[in-house]
Image (tube, helix red, strand yellow):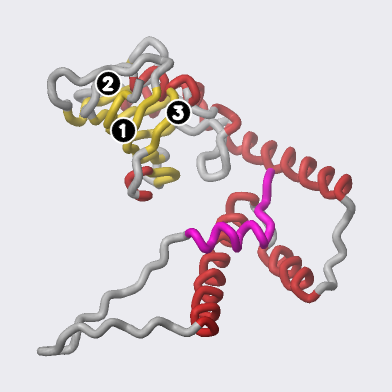
Amino acid sequence: MRLPALATLILIAHAAPLCAGDAPPAPESKPVEAAAPNAQDLRKQVSYLVGIRLKGMVDRTVADGDLDRAELLKGLAEAEAGTAKEPDQAAQKQLFETYDAQLQAKRNAGAAGQLDDNKAFLAENGKKKGITTTASGLQYEVLSKGPDGGKSPKSSSQVRVHYTGTKRDGSVFDSSVQRGEPAEFPLDGVIKGWTEGLQLMKEGDKFRFTIPSDLAYGERGPGPIGANAVLIFDVELIKVLN
């Protein structure tokens, strides 16, 4: 389990998009360009925004790692004050590995009974109109077709796609659409359900894939996904790159 250090969080935070409300101009007046803040004000404003983003990163770290928020914040405060007592690297490595094993065992125990539930869910989903189930168990639905003449990828192809991935409860765990930037990757470098499913598509097609856990991440599902999870992806194949 890799937990981001405070310095890493700060480096990441400055790249996060900054959101601001748009204030309308005063009636019957020309827009006036705001004066650039001086260096000291700019430093303070950016520091404040980094602090806001650090809070979100701490929230995600606590949730993904099942960590104790109070102790995490205590560690930050004592590190800032210079009073933190940090174990040596070997001891830290042992602590992280032991905790990671316990956390994975806890997740797996909670997910063991999920496999039978997955089977029932997939059986019912497969009966819905428009759903096709392949020999591997992958289920897909054609949402829309692209123009005639579009290429289909091979298992070794590099592709450009837009996608949104959700769990059965509808919660989004990853989305290139939300990021506003298509993803590019080789088909032989992703989960089996994607490697198989995208070869059924042509450029411009939009499919919905329901992927059994054994064609996704199985017991090793990362934090927000979890073990033995059925994954649902809405995918648009934008282009086959080679």
Where does residue 51 sit, x and y in percent of width and height?
56, 71
Q: Residue 118 carries which label?
A: 3
Task: Quote the CA–CA distance across marks 1 and 3.
Answer: 22 Å
Q: Earlier in the sequence, mark 3 or mark 2?
A: 3
Q: Distance between the residues labelled 1 and 2?
A: 10 Å
Q: Based on the displayed image, in which of its 4 quarters is residue 193 positioned?
A: top left
Image x and y of residue 112, in percent = 59, 30
Please say if the residues under marks 1 and 2 sit with CB atoms less than 8 Å apart.
Answer: yes
Q: Residues within 10 Å of mark 3 (few under 14, many from 20)?
A: some
Q: Are marks 3 and 2 in contact (CB under 8 Å)?
A: no
| 237 vs 121, nearest the viewer | 237
Amino acid type at circle 3 is Asn
Q: Residue at x 63, y 34 (%)?
A: 108
Left or right, residue 60 beside residue 94: left
Magenta range: 1-15
* Circle 1: element type: strand
Kind of element beneath mark 2 = loop
Mark 1 highlights which residue?
235
* Viewer-side label of 1, 3: 1
